[in-house]
Amino acid sequence: MYYTKIINGKNLIIKTVSSLILAGWLIFLATTTIPQVNVWKTSETLWTQTIENYGAERSNDPIFSFGLDMANKHMNLFGIAEVAYKNRGNFYGKEQNKPMQALKDYQILVQLDTKESEVYSNLGNIYGMMKEYNKALESYSKSVSLNDKNLNSYINRGITYSMMGDFAAALNDFSKALELSPGNLKVYQNRAFALLQSGSLEESIADYDLLINKQPGIPTHYFYRGLAYYKMKKYNKAIENFHKSTDINPGYSEGYYNLSVCYYTNEEFQNALKYANKAKSLGYKVSQSYLDQISAKIGKTGQAN
């Protein structure tokens, strides 16, 4: 997913979602061993069979007839089926990308008034998949209220704030995450991007410097540092970083496109056209009007010479 910023009539692409690194799903394991049989060919059938078997044994419990108004009184009977709901929900959400089915399993856990921080952390992930960001925030906040050291919830709540444009709140969460996990590169990457988006360019560059020192072979680090330099009008440094991103990944169409924009801004129109065409050849949708604009500039330059 991208958004495009208009700069002096030209489009500089700024990647958004791909820059944000979500924390992982938390996996729940049963304290009781569940015997594996041939019928359980996937996680879904394993956990569904567990729920159904336990439900047959507890047929009089309202929890399994979905009389959830009474379920809190029977929480001590939920046992292994609770674990099954959690893991089946994870299977639907993480492995199958079926957030609606995952949500149904997690809503059962919420209605049972679970006190597990991890449940709300994963529920936030589900709402995030559904782009229901306010509900995702509520879930992550509930998670950290139950466990104020839940690293994943701080990271993912920070990402959600970033996606909603609340960079101050995002940065607070990323700072908290770094307190819990100093040196965590995933957090630094998310914080660097939030700083870039909020206009804290020097701080963003400092984070990308750290990331590049630790992970010199990742092209996106150079790409976003190039964006920061571009915003600071340090075009030669921006060009250097975009070139580095495409050196590492020769198929990086966005890097070539941003090179074109930088060269255009620097009034190096031949290079601007070269890299616009390179981006186009790699599948990036370069507008014909932009190509015509560059060609017109080249024509005027030729006439002047």
Image (cartoon, rainbow, N blue to C red):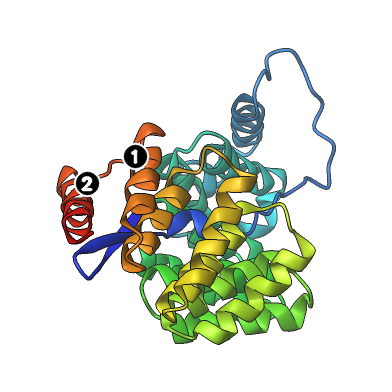
Q: Residue at x 44, y 38 (%)?
A: 98
Q: Position of residue 85 (x, y in %)?
A: 59, 44
Q: Which residue is mark 2?
A: 291
Answer yes or no: is residue 119 visible: no
For the residue pair 240 and 204, the one nearer the viewer reads as 240
Q: Which residue is mark 1?
A: 277
Query: Residue lying furthest front in this view?
Result: 305
Q: Residue at x 36, y 68 (%)?
A: 266
Query: Residue lying furthest top in this view?
Result: 38
The answer to which of marks 2 and 1 sits earlier in the sequence is 1
The image quadrant where one finds the C terminus is bottom left
Residue 232, by quadrant, is bottom left
Answer yes or no: is residue 169 visible: yes
Q: Are the residues at dot 2 and dot 1 in contact (C-beta closer than 8 Å)?
A: yes
For the residue pair 204 and 180, the one nearer the viewer reads as 204
Q: Residue at x 17, y 51 (%)?
A: 299
Crowd tier of the residue under label 2, counting other residues whose Cα lies within 10 Å: few below 14, some 14–19, many 20 or above: some
